[in-house]
Amino acid sequence: MRKIIFLLAVMFLFGFYNTGNSTVIDDTIAVVNNEPITVVDLFKTMQFYQIKSPDTALSKAIEDKLVIQRAKKLHLSIDKNEYQQLKNRFITKKRLELLNHAGLKRGDLEKFLKLQMLKRKIISYVVRDNLMVTDEQIKKQYLENKERFKTSGAIHLYEIAFNYDKADETDQQFKASKWLVDIKNGKISFISAAKKLGFNNFDMGWIESKQIYPSFYNIVKKLKIGEVYGLVRTKSQFLIIKLVGRRKPHLIPLAKVKDRIRATLINRNIAAAFTRWIDTLKQYASIHIYEK
């Protein structure tokens, strides 16, 4: 029943909160240590975190309320300069337009930004003893998840593209074919041809096999290193390509992914420690949710 009431309340807000209607009744739906959480608070939490479930949003709102309360007890505050930099970077005109459309105002966004900064600060305070990750733990994570550290193979390509539309399709195909013949016959090198045609970005670099369209990869995988091929026709281009290099799938050495694994494990430890901390706060807090 409570969930249905929540949904009706949120639907009501979607209909009236955006219009600035002052008749919206901001009912209290929960109290956390004598501080209320209202229907409007729930609505804003859903919009800011992009949560669809009112029950999930209420749990998030309660956690945020507990974080703010604990930060006050610990006398934690945010750095004004850091906040200003974050605000300048995050609160863009486009984002404000989207949030206004969703029913949030600039002040709401600023409030949530401050909350995220407080949360980050309190996390570092609470989980400071959970940042240690040993080399043994890193190695264990690596060995148990080898598939995640395997490359799919990659190719290094040069490419010259001749754009076309219906009006000049035949002419562009003829032009591309002439250049292809000259390159294959050794009259001009691929690089010289690309530069002469104005293609300064002909080097496509290393591309992972899984990122290439299957039909295109079926062509490339048959080429030898240094081989030139064409014309490859797409919806809007005729391509001349050259295979410069090929890498086989391989397991990335532990040394190259050690820092990435360490960061993953630290973040996992932080998330687990924060969850335990929040659960402890909830256990000893006075939380009343109004059943309607």
Image (cartoon, rainbow, N blue to C red):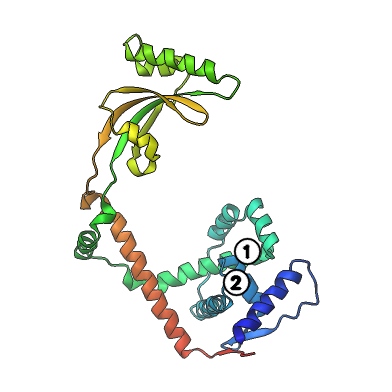
Q: According to the image, label 2 marks what residue?
A: 45
Q: Position of residue 101 (x, y in %)?
A: 70, 60
Q: Is residue 46 above or below residue 81?
A: below
Q: Is residue 112 above or below residue 160?
A: below
Query: In the rendered structure, which amino acid carries the disc numbered 2?
Result: Thr
Q: According to the image, label 1 marks what residue?
A: 109
Picture quarter with the C terminus:
bottom right
Tell me if 23 is positioned left or right of 74 in this view: right
Bin the neighbour count of mark 1 within 10 Å (Cα to Cα): few under 14, some 14-19, many 20 and up. some
Tell me if 20 is positioned left or right of 215 in this view: right
For the point 69% across and 73% down, which residue is it?
A: 11
Element type where label 1 sits in the image: helix
Q: Position of residue 155 (x, y in %)?
A: 31, 35
Q: Position of residue 36 (x, y in %)?
A: 63, 84
Element type where label 2 sits in the image: helix
Which of the 4 image quadrants contains residue 98?
A: bottom right
